[in-house]
Image (cartoon, rainbow, N blue to C red):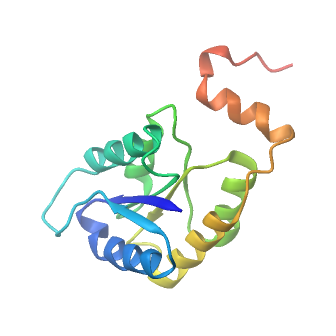
Amino acid sequence: MRIAIASDHAAVALKGALAAWLRDSGHEVDDLGPYDDARVDYPDYGYRLAEAIAAGRAARGIALCGSGIGISIAVNRHPACRCALVSEPLSATLAREHNDANVLAIGARLTGEDMAKACITAFLSTDFAGGRHGGRVDKLGHPAFAKEPA
């Protein structure tokens, strides 16, 4: 699978470790930066990742920052992206199964490398369930067309 990965300065070390691990696992990885720990703004890299997903240059994305919160907000500004911030594998599984998440966000200051790998493994190995979840996910991409609750 082709995976895009991006971070801010707080998560550049974790990004490097995860990118190498993903490559060793047989995935194509597009590292969108940054490449050192000089201070950068997470929205710039979140938007870069969102564009890669929206353009079809990657099937899935991994977004990292100190807490995971800021970069997940940035990615979710793009209507083609459904980014889920997780800290354990069950949430990563449900993000794919119920929400068809195409980007996973992780906080490097809150989640260790082994747990991040477990979350990514769950994320990449889970399919979207569809069914009753399909209509809900459709509304996420087109909020203007969402119906009022019954």
Q: Residue at x 22, y 50 (%)?
A: 41
Describe residue 44's horizontal placement relative to residue 56 as left or right. left
Q: Position of residue 61 (x, y in %)?
A: 47, 55
* Left or right: 11, with 18 as reference point: left
| Quadrant of the rendered image containing residue 107 | bottom left
Rendered location of residue 149, percent (x, y):
80, 21
Give 146 or 149, whichever is nearer the viewer: 146
Give the residue furthest to the left: 38
Q: Which quadrant of the structure image shows residue 13?
A: bottom left
Q: Image height check: is 9 above or below 74? A: below
In the foreground, 112 or 62? 62
Residue name at image x 86 percent, y 41 percent: 131
Q: Is residue 16 above or below residue 133?
A: below
Residue under the point 76% across and 16% down: 148
Q: Is residue 129 left or right of residue 120?
A: right
Q: Is residue 68 above or below residue 27?
A: above
- How many numbered marks appear? 0
Residue 113 x/y as whole percent: 45, 81
The quadrant of the picture occupied by the C terminus is top right
Residue occupying the point 22% across, 61% down: 34
Image location of residue 52, percent across then percent down: 39, 45
Between 80 and 3, the one lying in front of the other is: 3
Q: Is residue 104 left or right of residue 133?
A: left
